[in-house]
Amino acid sequence: MSYQFAWHPQVWTLLAPMMVTCGAALFILMAELFVKNVAWKWPALFGLAAATALVLARWNTPLAQAEEALWGALRADRFTLFLQVAILLAAALSILSAHSYGALSSTRRGEFYVLVLLATTGMMVLVSAGDLITMFLGLELLSFPTYVLCGFLRRQIKSNESALKYFVLGSFASSIFLYGVALVWGAAGSTRLVDIGAAAPTPLLLLGTLLLVIGFLFKVGAAPFHMWVPDVYEGAPTPVTMFMATAVKLAAFGAFTRALIVAFLRDSLPLEGILWWLACVTMIVGNLSALTQVNIKRLLAFSSVAHAGYMLLGLTAVAASGSTDGAAAVLYYLLAYTFMNIGAFTVVMLLGRRAEGGLLFERDWSGIARKHPILGLAMALFMIALGGLPPTAGFFGKYSLFRTAIDAGLVSLVVIAVLNTLVSVYYYLRVIVAMYMRPEREPSVPVLESAGRAHAFDGPGAMAAEEIASAPPPRLSERGAWAARVVVLICVIATLWLGMGPSRGAVPGMSRIMQWAEDAVASLR
C-alpha cells in the first residue's frame, strides 16, 4: 500500500498538545544547564495545563482532514481526548506530590520533570494511535523514561532493582508486541487498525493478535504477566509509583480498548473466552496475594493487579456482546481509579515520612490516625473507595462494570468479581484497623530494610545506612508538604464527587462524566 504525503494545517492542531508537553520537557532540560536551584515543577505544570487546554478545545472540533493527512496514524476522536485529559491530570497530580517528596529525596532536579513530561507525551501518542507502528512508538516513548524514573534514587538498592526488573521484563514484552505487529502486517497487509479489522481472519492473524494482547496485558499489570508489579511499585519512588499505577494504566487500557473495538473484534477470534479467563485469574491472583502483604506499597500493587481484572471484566463484556457500554464503564472506572490511587499513594508518602513510620502498616502505622487525624481520615476514604463501598467513586465504577457485564450475559464472571470485591474489603480494612484500632507505638527510628547496602537519600552528601541508625526520623518540611496536602484534598473531593455528584450544576457530576465516556467510546465506531 502506497501513501502520498499531503500536509494539512489541521495537523498542527492535532499535534499541538503533544508538542507542548514535549517542548516543556526540552525547555526544562536546556534551561537547567544555565539556571540552578529553580522549582522546575512550575514550568512542567504550566506545560501540562497548556496541553490540557488545547485538548479540551478540540472536544467539538472534528479533525478528519488532519487524520487523513497522517494516514490514520493518529486519531483526534473524543476517545483520544477523554484519555489525554485523564493522563495529563494524573501527571500533574504526580508532579505536585513529587515536589513534597523532593524535600527529602532530592527529586527536585529538572531531569525528574523532563522524564515525566516525556513519558506523558508517549502516553498521549499511545492513546491516539490508529496504527500499530504509531502505537509501538508511543509505547516505547512512555516506557524508557519510566524505566529511568523507577531507578531515579540511584543510591538506593531497591530503586535500582525495580528499574532493572522493569527494563528487562518490559523489553521482553515490547519484543513480543513488535513480533505481533509483524505477524499482523504479514496477515492483513497493513498496520492500520481499521484495515486490520476488515481483513480476512487467518491463523497468522490470530497468532499476531494474541501476541499484541500479551503486550497490552503486561503494561496493564494483568495476571499472569503481573510479576513485575509488586517489586517495581515497592522500589520506585512513591511519586513514580503513583504515576505508573494511574497514568500508565490509563494509556495501556486506552490503547487496548481502541485496538479491541476497532481491530480485534471478529467472530473467528475467541477473545471473549480469553478475556474471561484473564479477568478471572487477574482478580483472584491480585486479591489473594494482597491478603498476605504487610508492606503498604506492595498491598496497593497487588490491589492494582486486582483492579486490572475488574477493568478486563468490562472489556470482556465488549467482546461478548459487541456493545460499547462496557468500554464506557472502563473509562469511567479508570478516571475514578486515578483519583483513588493517587490519593492513597500520597497519604502513604506523607505518613511514611512524617510519623516515624515506614511502609509496614501493621507495625509503623499503629494508632497513626490519632497523630494525623486528617490524613488518617483521607486514607480511610481511599481504602473504602478502592474496596468499592458507597458512596464513593469506587462503588459507582464497579456497579457500572458489573451491570454491563450482566447485560452481556457474563453472570458467572460477575459473581466471581463480587466475591473478589468482598475479599478486597478485608485487606483494605486492615489498613484502617491499623490506623484507628491498634495501640499507638513508641516513636522509633525507621529501620532501613537494605541497611548496609544502600543510602537513604539521593544526591551529594547522601547519608550512609549506618549513619541513619543514629539520625532523627526524617520529616517533611511545612514548606514542602503543602503540595501533597493539595493533592490529597483534590483526590478526596473527586472520589466523593464521582460517586455521588449531582447530574445538574456548574460542575459535572457522575452522570455527566459517564455520558462523556459514552460519547468518547461512540467516536470509535
Image (cartoon, helix red, strand yellow):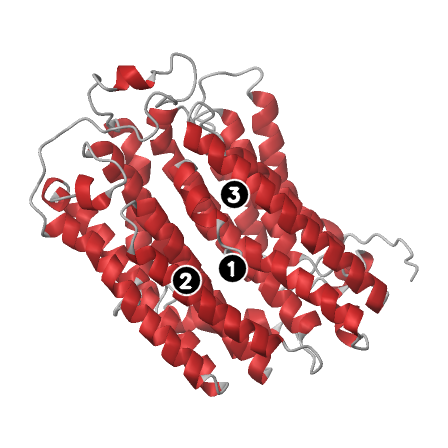
Nearer the observer, 386 or 85: 386
Q: Looking at this rendering, what residue extends furthest in the top direction?
A: 461
Distance (Cα) linking label 3 and label 1: 34 Å
Q: Is residue 344 visible?
A: yes
- What secondary structure is found at the residue carrying circle 1? loop
- For the C terminus, the image quarter is bottom right
Image height of 361 relative to 312, above or below? above
| Residue 95 picture location, percent across and down | 43, 38
Distance (Cα) linking label 1 and label 2: 9 Å
Please, what is the three-letter code of the amino acid marked with disc 1? Pro
Residue carrying label 2: 285
- What secondary structure is found at the residue carrying circle 2? helix
Dot 2 or dot 3, earlier in sequence: 3
All told, the count of numbered labels is 3
Label placed on residue 48: 3
Label placed on residue 224: 1
Distance (Cα) linking label 2 and label 3: 36 Å
Dot 1 or dot 2, earlier in sequence: 1
- Classify 10 Å Cα crowding around label 2: few (below 14), some (14-19), many (20 and above): many
